[in-house]
Amino acid sequence: MDTRWSQVWDSLVATPFGLYSTWEERLQSACGVPALHFHVLQTLATAPEGRLRLQELAEAVRHSQSGTTRLVDRLEKEGLVGRHSCEADRRVTWAILSEKGKATYQKALPVWESFLNDHLHKGLSTDEAETLHRLLLKLQGTLAPGVESCPSQRTRETVAS
């Protein structure tokens, strides 16, 4: 087999892991916020009315439903999010960004923007970024329907089998 495909794969895996590690370290040192917590805060901050159903939140942050429930538990204990039961349908629970969550997100947002500038904007031209985005979407299109796009979406049952 042509070794170029292995080299492409190695770069494809190493780059996002390296970027994520860099982001996690920068965010932790600047704000004391884990990257996944920021992602939840950002998702809720940009959602209509600052809230999402837990199932929608799980899909948006590419996390399993049970993992999202535990994550929201931790964020709720930290006072960053709250929960609200839907009056019309008690089976629905909303995750809502709290005032502390909004303030934490606003504090972390400049760190995020600086990270994007340092590692994406300075590293790629606008055309290159658009090309990379199209190529990544093209690769995603080769995946079977229903395949998780992130390992954290797998449930324990899936991992155990």
Image: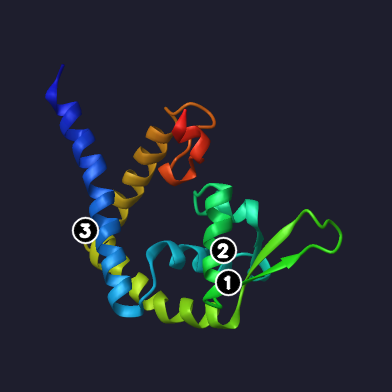
In the displayed structure, does residue 44 sit left or right of residue 15?
right
CB atoms of marks 1 and 2 within 8 Å: yes
Task: Work out which quarter of the rendered image holds the N terminus and state it.
Answer: top left
- As measured in the structure, the alpha-carbon distance from the residue carrying label 3 to the one carrying label 1 is 37 Å
Extreme residue in the right direction = 88
**10 Å neighbourhood of mark 1: few (<14), some, or many (≥20)?**
some
Which residue is identified by label 1?
A: 76
Residue drawn where x is 50% and y is 54% of the image: 61
**Between discs 3 and 1, the one toward the N terminus:** 1
The x and y percentages for residue 59 are 56, 49
The x and y percentages for residue 117 are 28, 68
- As measured in the structure, the alpha-carbon distance from the residue carrying label 3 to the one carrying label 2 is 34 Å
Residue drawn where x is 42% and y is 27% of the image: 142
Which residue is identified by label 3?
A: 123
Q: Amino acid at mark 3?
A: Gly
Tag nearer the camera, 3 or 2: 2
Q: Amino acid at mark 2?
A: Val
Q: Secondary structure at mark 1?
A: helix
The x and y percentages for residue 102 are 54, 79
Which labelled disc corresponds to residue 72? Answer: 2
- As measured in the structure, the alpha-carbon distance from the residue carrying label 1 to the one carrying label 2 is 6 Å
Q: Secondary structure at mark 2?
A: helix
**10 Å neighbourhood of mark 2: few (<14), some, or many (≥20)?**
many
| Residue 12 in the image: above or below residue 145 | below
In the foreground, 52 or 64: 64
**10 Å neighbourhood of mark 3: few (<14), some, or many (≥20)?**
few
Q: Amino acid at mark 1?
A: Glu
| Residue 13 in the image: above or below residue 55 | above
Q: Quadrant of residue 116?
A: bottom left
